[in-house]
Image (spheres, rainbow, N blue to C red):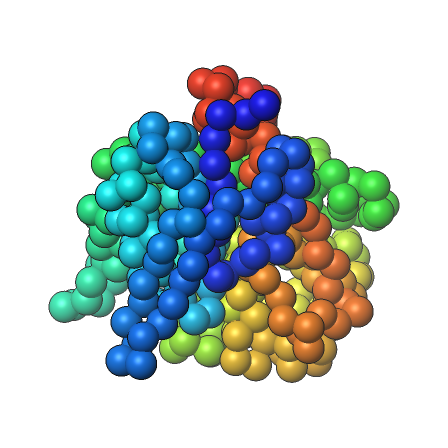
Amino acid sequence: MLNLKIFAGSSNIDLAENICAHLNIKLSKLNINTFSNGNISVEILENVREKDVFFIQSFSEPVNRNIVELFVAMDALRSASAKRITAVIPYFSYSRSDKKDAPRISIAGRLMADLIKEAGANRVLTMDLHSDSVHGFFSMPVDHLTAIPIIGEHVRKNMDLSSAVAVATDAGGAKRVGRFVNFLNIPMAIIDKRRINDVKVEQGLVVGEVKGLDAIIFDDEISTGGTLLATAKTLRDAGVRKMIAAVTHPVLCGAALHNIKRSEIAQVIVTNTVSIHEENRIKRLKVLSVAPLFAEAVKRINSGESIGALFR
Ligand code: R5P
């Protein structure tokens, strides 16, 4: 019997229940209310005194509401004398704000890391942050999981890899794709990308051999799908044979579905770090579960075992 409790906010109850099912425990109970003025209140309905508590919340739509829900819940858990609180954030959306690349802007990823600590977290468990540097924003232990083994195993079982190449949609994604190609033992290519605005990107040079090969576009998230669409066009012009995409976080906002449908990408492999609306569950989307990996990580944090060993 594990000596821990798992609670969840409203962002991804299915994933939370799945993680609990893998651990053979019940999701603990709480009440989340919204007052008429929009304020959020959270009431913990179980004793957590001296308990090792995990609170699961993805920073998915409605992002800012879900973040405040996490803050208020962790504050309530701390007031209720939880021994240790781990903020389990399968998708940490503000990690895209990780550098000062324009004058007078906030590095909001860093701000969020500070606020998570201030709200009561003692540690963080997350997956595939936009960049490794975000890990360093937290002044507490962070366990940073990757979906590479889950996605990689699926690709290995379902695709002929003899003519495959993995493609990074921009230079920033090169390290991530480097780890993916190491897992699959295939070559990689990198595309030169510039973001014009939230929905529009421009791409240029393809660095690496792609002509006549089957491309696996590998990225951390699909937001509006602008990057995927541009990448598919760039690869088509560069003479790629077939292409699929593999992406950890299916944010799928704005014109994402429309962009996926009009692209030549045969399949988009994603995970369930973000809950996918029924209308977005199109045939071309293959959803893999990260619940077993999160469950194992929770168990190891609770018992003080290595998480790194999971990926070696
Ligand atoms: C960008 O650097 C990321 O790795 C993703 O490529 C990006 O967040 C995807 O956004 P969108 O789908 O809106 O192009």
Residue at the image position 62 percent from the left and 66 percent from the top: 276
Residue 63 appears at what percent x and percent y? Answer: 40, 67
- 50 in relation to 261, above or below: above
Given residues 247 and 17, the one toward you in this image is: 17
- 230 in relation to 147, above or below: below
Given residues 45 and 88, the one toward you in this image is: 45
Residue 289 appears at what percent x and percent y? Answer: 67, 48
Given residues 308 and 21, the one toward you in this image is: 21
Residue 39 appears at what percent x and percent y? Answer: 28, 71
Residue at the image position 34 percent from the left and 33 percent from the top: 49
On the rendered image, what quadrant is the C terminus found in?
top right
User: In the drawing, does residue 108 fall left or right of residue 278?
Assistant: left
Q: Quadrant of residue 188?
A: top right
Residue at the image position 76 percent from the left and 44 percent from the top: 154
Q: Is residue 210 visible?
A: no
User: In the drawing, does residue 248 fall left or right of residue 138?
Assistant: right
Given residues 160 and 35, the one toward you in this image is: 35
Q: Is residue 163 visible?
A: yes
